[in-house]
Amino acid sequence: MTHPTVPLRLYLGIFAALILLTGLTVAVAFFDLGGGRLHLVNAAVAITIALAKALLVILYFMHVRYSSRLIWIFVGAGGFWLLILFVFTLADFLSRGWVPLPLPWNP
Amino acid sequence: MAEHSSHVAHQFDDSTQQYEASTLGMWAFLLTEIMFFGGLFAGFFVYILGHAQAFAEGSRHLDIALGTVNTVVLLGSSLTMALAVRSAQQGHRNGQLLFLGLTVILGSVFLGIKGLEYAHKFAQHLVPGPGFRMEGPHAQSAQLFFSFYFAMTGVHALHMVVGIGLLAWLFVNAWRGKYTEAYFTPVEVSGLYWHFVDVVWIFLFPTLYLVARHG
C-alpha cells in the first residue's frame, strides 16, 4: 500500500528541527559575516539553512523518502531544472564586467 | 480483474494504482509551480546584483519579528497538515477534523499577519507607484525591492488562500467520514500542495527579510 504511517515522534522531531533552523537563520542574519559587497557568506549560510529545511519538509512531510522511484525522479527533475534556471541566468549577470570589452552595457 | 471499490475510478486497477497516479500528477503540477516561483526568484537575484544597496534599504523596512513569527506559524501548519494525513491514513475521523481545523486556523493566522504587514507598508507609503515615499539615497531603486516583495509574497498568499479552500473542502468530506485507511488520497495530495507552499516560504523569508538587508 501507499506509504507507511510515519511515527508521530518523527514528525515532532522534524518540526523541532525546522524551528531550530529558523532560529539559527534569524540569529545569523544579525551578524555581518563578510563575503564582499554582496555579503555572499551571509547569503550562503541562509541558503544552506533554507535548503536543509526544504529537504526535511520534502523528504518527511511530503513523504518523498517513502515514495516510489518515479516520484524521486520527478522531484529531482524539478530541482535540476531550477538549477539550470539559476546557474545560466547568474552565469551571465555575475560575469558581466569581468572582461572589459567595449559593449553597450559595459562602457 | 480486481474488484472495484466505490472510491476507485474506472481507469484504475486498484486503490494503490490510483494513489500513485494522483500523487505523481500532483508532483507534475508542483514542478510547474517550482518553475513559476523560480522565475520570480531568478528575477530577484538578477536585480539585487545591480541594486544591492537599494534592496538593502528596502529590506530593512521589513519586520523580522513578524516574518519570523509567520515562519513558525506556517511550519506549524505543515506539521498539523502532516498529522491530518496521518489521521486519515489511520482512519481517525476526529484526528482529521482536529488537525485539518488547526491547519486552516494556522494558515489564516499567517494571512492575517501578512495583511498586517501589508497595512504597515501602505501606511508608510512603501507601495511602489506614485505614492511611494522613502528616505535615503537609493529611495527610487528601492521601489524595485518592494515590487518584488509584493509580487512574491502576494502570489504566495494567493496560493495560501487556494490551500485554505482545499482544506475546507477536505474538512467537509472528513466530517462525512469519507476518508479511511483504504482511501485518503485527496488528503495526501492536498497535503503535498500545502507543504509545497510552505517550502516556497522557507526560501522567501530569508531572501526578502534576512539576506537582502545586508548590502
Image (spheres, grey):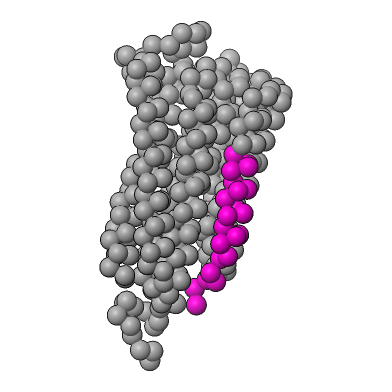
Front residue (pair B133, B87): B87
Left or right: where does residue A67 sit relative to residue B97? right
Q: Position of residue B21 (x, y in %)?
A: 42, 70
Residue displayed at 39% across by 40% down: B109
Measuring from the top left, give residue B73's x and y in whole percent: 47, 42
Q: Judge from the rendering whether residue A40 lies leftward or rightward of residue B153; answer left or right.
A: right
Looking at the image, which residue is at 52% across and 34% down? Answer: B68
Residue A12 in percent (x, y) is at: 58, 55
Quarter containing the C terminus of chain B: top right
* Residue plotted at (30% across, 64% down): B175
For the stretch drawn in magenta, the main secondary structure is: helix
Residue B27 visible (yes or no): no
* Quadrant of the image occupied by residue B158: top left
User: From what the image shows, is residue B167 above or below residue B117?
Assistant: below
Return the x and y of residue B118 as percentages of the image width and height: 37, 27
What's the magenta region? A1-22
On the rendered structure, is B183 left or right of A66? left
The answer to whether residue B93 is visible is yes
Q: Which residue corresponds to the image point at 57% horizontal and 29% vertical from the top-left? A: B210
Q: Is residue A17 magenta?
A: yes
Q: Quadrant of the N terminus of chain B?
A: bottom left
The foreground one among A34 and A30 is A30
Please identify the quarter of the rendering in which residue A91 is found. top right
Instruction: Say if B140 sits above or below A65 in the image.
Output: above
Let me know if residue B205 is in the magenta part.
no
